Image (tube, rainbow, N blue to C red):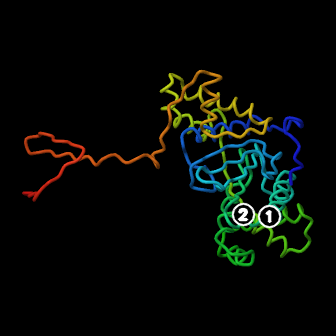
């Protein structure tokens, strides 16, 4: 569990990679987009460095929009990570996840709390992500073990699972193999992996640039300007354990940079327009209207 020390006191505000990830999430927040991992709900809040508020995966916390208490995903951000049983950083992640299972297990089971792992350069996050999906589909570690048998599941996944179990056993000093497998199943079932590429030419960064283009153009700015400003804002928020919704981000852009973003209406929640009908007769004349009523229509061949 977090000791509650302020990130501004410890300097633990993370790296530029973490803030680039946060910038992408702030862009999604402005656009009314969905939480990128773990849930299919619109984003409501983005919070940085939340160890002071008792969050265990404290780098970034994303809470869904809607009525409280809305589900949230706590995301640990790693520029590099090796998914092996001997890697110190991965063992530390598993130790933190094990603590969440012990203290907040009911929230994980209910789906009120999710754990996220956002990784840049990696060794094995693809198989790890697949293992998490398998764990969620199986009721317990014994059921998962039957799925991981030779001839049923490919060797790469079986090897990676053994690395996870080894890391968990090391993290919490478990010598009993069955107990380590049971705890590993609980951790995997609650974990969601995001392989994120936010370098200057990275796929996630460039995708967000494209998707922010309409908002930025409406203010005579480029999407690159906007995303870089969001990155700078994230760097200000991190040391202060910042918590923002879309309205707060818009207000900051207006206050600090004179950027008055138009409200973005999420297509998923936009009111539907009246049905539109178009009729073309044989001479090429087009008739169009928002609403039309046809009494006893007849159609010839």
Q: Nearer the viewer, residue 16 or 278?
A: 278
Please provide percent x and percent y for residue 40: 57, 55
As drawn, 294 above or below 138:
above
Quadrant into which the C terminus falls: bottom left
Q: Name the residue under label 1.
A: 101
Quadrant in the rendering for residue 150: bottom right
> What residue is shown at x 8% (from left), y 58% (from top)?
298
Please provide percent x and percent y for residue 276: 26, 46
Crowding at dot 2, Cα within 10 Å, few <14 / some 14-19 / many 20+, comes out as many
Crowding at dot 1, Cα within 10 Å, few <14 / some 14-19 / many 20+, comes out as some
> What residue is shown at x 65% (from left), y 75% (from top)?
152
Quadrant in the rendering for residue 251: top right
Helix, strand or loop for disc 2: helix
> What residue is shown at x 78% (from left), y 39% (from top)?
241
Please provide percent x and percent y for residue 51: 82, 47
N-terminal of the pair, mark 1 or mark 2, is: 1
Q: Nearer the viewer, residue 195 or 62?
A: 62
Quadrant in the rendering for residue 182: bottom right
Do callouts 1 and 2 mark residues in contact (Cβ within 8 Å)? yes
Q: Name the residue under label 2.
A: 108
> What residue is shown at x 80% (from left), y 60% (from top)?
100
């Amino acid at each position: 569990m977090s000791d509650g020390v302020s990130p501004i006191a410890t300097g633990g505000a993370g790296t530029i990679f973490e803030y680039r990830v946060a910038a992408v999430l702030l862009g999604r927040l402005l656009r009314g987009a969905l939480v990128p991992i773990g849930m299919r709900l619109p984003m409501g809040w983005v919070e940085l460095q939340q160890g002071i508020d008792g969050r265990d995966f404290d780098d970034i916390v994303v809470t869904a929009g809607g009525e409280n208490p809305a589900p949230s995903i706590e995301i640990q951000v790693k520029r590099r990570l090796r998914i092996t049983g001997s890697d110190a950083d991965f063992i530390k992640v598993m130790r933190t996840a094990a603590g969440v299972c012990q203290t907040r297990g009911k929230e994980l089971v209910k789906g009120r709390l999710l754990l996220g792992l956002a990784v840049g350069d990696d060794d094995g996050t693809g198989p790890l992500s697949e293992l998490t999906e398998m764990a969620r589909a199986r009721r317990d570690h014994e059921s998962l073990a039957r799925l991981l048998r030779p001839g049923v599941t490919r060797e790469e996944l079986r090897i990676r699972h053994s690395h996870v179990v080894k890391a968990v056993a090391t993290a919490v000093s478990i010598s009993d193999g069955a107990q380590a497998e049971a705890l590993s199943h609980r951790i995997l079932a609650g974990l969601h992996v995001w392989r994120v590429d936010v370098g200057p030419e990275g796929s996630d960064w460039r995708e967000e640039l494209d998707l922010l283009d309409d908002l930025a153009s409406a203010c005579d700015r480029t999407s690159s300007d906007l995303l870089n400003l969001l990155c700078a804002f994230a760097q200000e928020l991190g040391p202060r354990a910042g918590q923002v919704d879309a309205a707060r981000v818009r207000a900051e852009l207006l206050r600090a940079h004179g950027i008055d973003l138009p409200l973005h209406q999420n297509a998923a929640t936009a009111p539907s327009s009246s049905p539109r009908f178009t009729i073309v007769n044989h001479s090429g004349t087009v008739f169009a209207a928002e609403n039309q009523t046809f009494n006893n229509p007849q159609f010839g061949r």
